[in-house]
Amino acid sequence: MVNHEWTTAIASEYNWTQAGSTSAGAPSLLYAVLVGTILACIDLGAIIGNALVVLSVITNPKLRTITNRFVVSLACADLSVGILVMPLAVKVEVTGTWNLGSILCDVWISLDVLLCTASILNLCAISVDRYMAVTRPLQTFTEYWRHRCVANAMITGAWLSAVAITCPPLLGWREANRSNIEVCTLTQDPGYIVYSALGSFYVPMV
Protein backbone atom coordinates (compact mmCIF):
# COMPACT_ATOMS: atom_id res chain seq x y z
CA MET A 1 0.00 0.00 0.00
CA VAL A 2 1.13 3.52 -0.77
CA ASN A 3 0.34 6.26 1.71
CA HIS A 4 -0.10 9.92 0.78
CA GLU A 5 3.38 11.39 1.27
CA TRP A 6 2.48 14.98 0.35
CA THR A 7 0.64 15.86 3.54
CA THR A 8 2.52 18.13 5.96
CA ALA A 9 3.25 17.29 9.60
CA ILE A 10 -0.25 18.54 10.32
CA ALA A 11 -2.47 17.42 7.48
CA SER A 12 -4.81 20.39 7.79
CA GLU A 13 -2.12 22.96 6.92
CA TYR A 14 -1.16 23.21 3.26
CA ASN A 15 1.55 25.55 2.05
CA TRP A 16 2.63 24.33 -1.35
CA THR A 17 6.21 24.94 -2.44
CA GLN A 18 7.09 27.37 -5.19
CA ALA A 19 10.44 25.75 -6.02
CA GLY A 20 11.28 26.01 -9.68
CA SER A 21 8.88 28.93 -10.18
CA THR A 22 9.34 31.81 -12.52
CA SER A 23 9.61 35.43 -11.51
CA ALA A 24 5.83 35.82 -11.97
CA GLY A 25 5.20 33.20 -9.29
CA ALA A 26 4.01 30.37 -11.56
CA PRO A 27 6.16 27.22 -11.87
CA SER A 28 8.32 27.00 -14.98
CA LEU A 29 7.22 24.71 -17.81
CA LEU A 30 10.14 22.32 -17.27
CA TYR A 31 9.39 22.07 -13.55
CA ALA A 32 5.70 21.50 -14.23
CA VAL A 33 6.34 18.76 -16.77
CA LEU A 34 8.96 16.89 -14.73
CA VAL A 35 7.23 17.11 -11.37
CA GLY A 36 3.79 16.51 -12.86
CA THR A 37 4.97 13.38 -14.66
CA ILE A 38 6.73 11.94 -11.60
CA LEU A 39 3.81 12.60 -9.27
CA ALA A 40 1.28 11.29 -11.78
CA CYS A 41 3.27 8.04 -12.03
CA ILE A 42 3.34 7.73 -8.25
CA ASP A 43 -0.42 8.30 -8.15
CA LEU A 44 -1.01 5.69 -10.85
CA GLY A 45 1.16 3.21 -8.97
CA ALA A 46 -0.81 3.84 -5.77
CA ILE A 47 -4.11 3.25 -7.55
CA ILE A 48 -3.02 0.08 -9.36
CA GLY A 49 -1.16 -1.41 -6.39
CA ASN A 50 -3.93 -0.91 -3.86
CA ALA A 51 -6.63 -1.99 -6.33
CA LEU A 52 -4.76 -5.26 -6.90
CA VAL A 53 -4.57 -5.84 -3.14
CA VAL A 54 -8.34 -5.43 -2.79
CA LEU A 55 -9.10 -7.56 -5.86
CA SER A 56 -6.76 -10.35 -4.76
CA VAL A 57 -8.58 -10.73 -1.44
CA ILE A 58 -12.02 -10.48 -3.03
CA THR A 59 -11.32 -13.08 -5.73
CA ASN A 60 -9.28 -15.57 -3.67
CA PRO A 61 -11.22 -17.23 -0.83
CA LYS A 62 -8.00 -18.43 0.80
CA LEU A 63 -6.97 -14.81 1.36
CA ARG A 64 -10.17 -13.88 3.19
CA THR A 65 -8.60 -14.13 6.62
CA ILE A 66 -9.23 -11.91 9.61
CA THR A 67 -5.81 -10.30 9.25
CA ASN A 68 -6.47 -9.48 5.61
CA ARG A 69 -9.58 -7.57 6.64
CA PHE A 70 -7.21 -5.01 8.12
CA VAL A 71 -5.08 -5.10 4.98
CA VAL A 72 -8.10 -4.50 2.73
CA SER A 73 -9.29 -1.65 4.94
CA LEU A 74 -5.85 -0.05 4.67
CA ALA A 75 -5.75 -0.63 0.92
CA CYS A 76 -9.20 0.96 0.52
CA ALA A 77 -8.02 4.06 2.38
CA ASP A 78 -4.87 4.35 0.27
CA LEU A 79 -6.76 3.59 -2.96
CA SER A 80 -9.20 6.38 -2.13
CA VAL A 81 -6.27 8.73 -1.56
CA GLY A 82 -4.92 7.84 -4.98
CA ILE A 83 -8.26 8.44 -6.69
CA LEU A 84 -9.74 11.36 -4.75
CA VAL A 85 -6.81 13.29 -3.28
CA MET A 86 -3.57 12.85 -5.17
CA PRO A 87 -4.75 14.04 -8.62
CA LEU A 88 -5.68 17.47 -7.27
CA ALA A 89 -2.50 17.48 -5.18
CA VAL A 90 -0.54 17.04 -8.40
CA LYS A 91 -2.46 19.92 -9.97
CA VAL A 92 -1.68 22.24 -7.05
CA GLU A 93 1.98 21.22 -7.00
CA VAL A 94 2.34 21.81 -10.72
CA THR A 95 0.43 25.11 -10.97
CA GLY A 96 1.41 26.53 -7.57
CA THR A 97 -2.12 27.70 -6.79
CA TRP A 98 -5.58 26.35 -5.94
CA ASN A 99 -8.14 28.53 -7.81
CA LEU A 100 -10.87 25.86 -7.77
CA GLY A 101 -13.13 27.54 -5.22
CA SER A 102 -13.72 27.16 -1.49
CA ILE A 103 -16.34 24.37 -1.68
CA LEU A 104 -14.14 21.98 -3.64
CA CYS A 105 -11.25 22.97 -1.37
CA ASP A 106 -13.23 21.92 1.70
CA VAL A 107 -14.22 18.62 0.09
CA TRP A 108 -10.73 17.83 -1.17
CA ILE A 109 -8.75 18.67 1.93
CA SER A 110 -11.32 17.04 4.23
CA LEU A 111 -10.98 13.83 2.21
CA ASP A 112 -7.20 14.15 2.50
CA VAL A 113 -7.31 14.42 6.29
CA LEU A 114 -9.97 11.70 6.58
CA LEU A 115 -8.29 9.13 4.36
CA CYS A 116 -4.73 9.72 5.56
CA THR A 117 -5.85 9.51 9.19
CA ALA A 118 -7.82 6.34 8.44
CA SER A 119 -4.71 4.89 6.81
CA ILE A 120 -2.59 5.64 9.87
CA LEU A 121 -5.17 4.21 12.28
CA ASN A 122 -5.57 1.08 10.16
CA LEU A 123 -1.81 0.58 10.38
CA CYS A 124 -2.14 0.78 14.15
CA ALA A 125 -4.90 -1.81 14.07
CA ILE A 126 -2.71 -4.12 11.97
CA SER A 127 0.14 -3.76 14.46
CA VAL A 128 -2.15 -4.69 17.35
CA ASP A 129 -3.52 -7.66 15.42
CA ARG A 130 -0.01 -8.90 14.63
CA TYR A 131 1.04 -8.50 18.25
CA MET A 132 -1.93 -10.61 19.36
CA ALA A 133 -1.14 -13.22 16.71
CA VAL A 134 2.43 -13.55 17.99
CA THR A 135 1.56 -13.65 21.68
CA ARG A 136 -1.54 -15.86 21.24
CA PRO A 137 -0.91 -18.05 18.18
CA LEU A 138 -3.39 -20.84 19.00
CA GLN A 139 -7.11 -20.14 18.88
CA THR A 140 -10.16 -22.26 19.57
CA PHE A 141 -13.28 -21.91 17.42
CA THR A 142 -14.87 -19.61 20.00
CA GLU A 143 -11.75 -17.45 20.14
CA TYR A 144 -11.75 -17.24 16.33
CA TRP A 145 -15.20 -15.70 16.25
CA ARG A 146 -14.31 -13.38 19.12
CA HIS A 147 -11.21 -12.36 17.16
CA ARG A 148 -13.39 -11.73 14.10
CA CYS A 149 -15.76 -9.46 16.02
CA VAL A 150 -12.89 -7.56 17.60
CA ALA A 151 -11.27 -7.09 14.19
CA ASN A 152 -14.48 -5.67 12.73
CA ALA A 153 -14.82 -3.35 15.72
CA MET A 154 -11.22 -2.14 15.37
CA ILE A 155 -11.66 -1.38 11.67
CA THR A 156 -14.92 0.44 12.32
CA GLY A 157 -13.32 2.36 15.18
CA ALA A 158 -10.41 3.42 12.96
CA TRP A 159 -12.72 4.92 10.35
CA LEU A 160 -15.04 6.56 12.88
CA SER A 161 -12.05 8.09 14.65
CA ALA A 162 -10.85 9.49 11.33
CA VAL A 163 -14.28 11.03 10.78
CA ALA A 164 -14.24 12.54 14.29
CA ILE A 165 -10.86 14.15 13.57
CA THR A 166 -11.92 15.49 10.16
CA CYS A 167 -15.40 16.89 10.83
CA PRO A 168 -14.90 19.69 13.45
CA PRO A 169 -13.72 22.36 10.95
CA LEU A 170 -16.72 21.59 8.74
CA LEU A 171 -18.98 22.10 11.75
CA GLY A 172 -17.53 25.51 12.61
CA TRP A 173 -14.18 24.96 14.35
CA ARG A 174 -12.26 27.27 11.99
CA GLU A 175 -11.53 30.90 11.18
CA ALA A 176 -14.52 33.16 10.62
CA ASN A 177 -13.21 34.65 7.36
CA ARG A 178 -11.41 32.71 4.65
CA SER A 179 -11.03 35.07 1.73
CA ASN A 180 -7.88 33.64 0.14
CA ILE A 181 -9.03 30.89 -2.22
CA GLU A 182 -5.64 30.57 -3.92
CA VAL A 183 -4.34 28.59 -0.93
CA CYS A 184 -6.46 25.63 0.12
CA THR A 185 -6.47 25.11 3.90
CA LEU A 186 -8.92 23.33 6.16
CA THR A 187 -8.25 25.58 9.14
CA GLN A 188 -5.34 27.16 10.96
CA ASP A 189 -7.09 27.35 14.30
CA PRO A 190 -4.44 26.45 16.93
CA GLY A 191 -6.86 24.37 18.99
CA TYR A 192 -7.87 22.20 16.06
CA ILE A 193 -4.27 21.85 14.91
CA VAL A 194 -3.34 20.39 18.31
CA TYR A 195 -6.46 18.20 18.34
CA SER A 196 -5.87 16.81 14.84
CA ALA A 197 -2.15 16.32 15.40
CA LEU A 198 -2.81 14.32 18.55
CA GLY A 199 -5.44 12.14 16.89
CA SER A 200 -3.66 11.65 13.58
CA PHE A 201 -0.03 11.35 14.66
CA TYR A 202 0.96 11.40 18.32
CA VAL A 203 -1.64 9.06 19.85
CA PRO A 204 -1.16 6.49 17.06
CA MET A 205 2.59 6.77 17.53
CA VAL A 206 2.25 5.92 21.22
Image (cartoon, grey):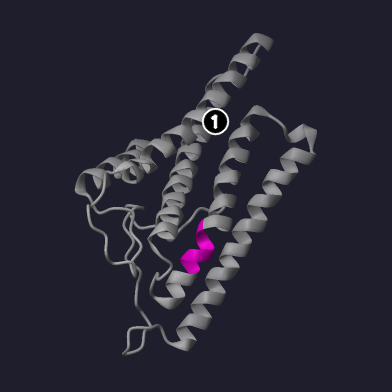
Which residue corresponds to the image point at 55% horizontal and 45% vertical from the top-left?
77
Q: Which x, y percent locates residue 105?
A: 41, 59
What amino acid type is highlighted by mark number 1? Arg
Task: Report whether 128 appears left or right of 178.
Answer: right
Q: Image check: 75 left or right of 58? A: left
Q: Nearer the viewer, residue 190 or 132?
A: 190
The residue singled out by tag 1 in the image is 130
Q: Nearer the viewer, residue 51 or 84?
A: 84
Residue found at x 22% / y 50%: 189
Q: What residue do we see at 74% from left, 39% from top?
A: 58
Nearest the viewer among 186 and 11 is 186
Q: Secondary structure at mark 1?
A: helix
Q: From this view, report whether residue 80 is shown above or below residue 202.
A: below
Main SS, magenta region, reads: helix
Is residue 131 visible in the rendered image? The answer is no
Where is 154 relative to 72, above or below? above
Instruction: Residue 107 in the image: state x and y as whole percent.
Output: 45, 53
Q: Which residues are magenta?
A: 85-90
Q: Position of residue 145 (x, y in %)?
A: 64, 15
- Hey, which quadrant is residue 17 in on the image? bottom left
Q: Position of residue 140 (x, y in %)?
A: 66, 11
Residue at 48% across, 81% down: 32
Is 45 placed above or below 74 here? below
Q: Quick check: is 171 in the magenta stretch?
A: no
**Nearer-the-camera pick, 180 or 77:** 180
Q: Residues within 10 Å of mark 1 (few under 14, many from 20)?
A: some
Can residue 196 be seen at all in this image of the molecule?
yes
- Rendering quarter of residue 99: bottom left
Number of marks present in the image shown: 1
Residue that protrudes farthest toward the bottom in the picture: 23
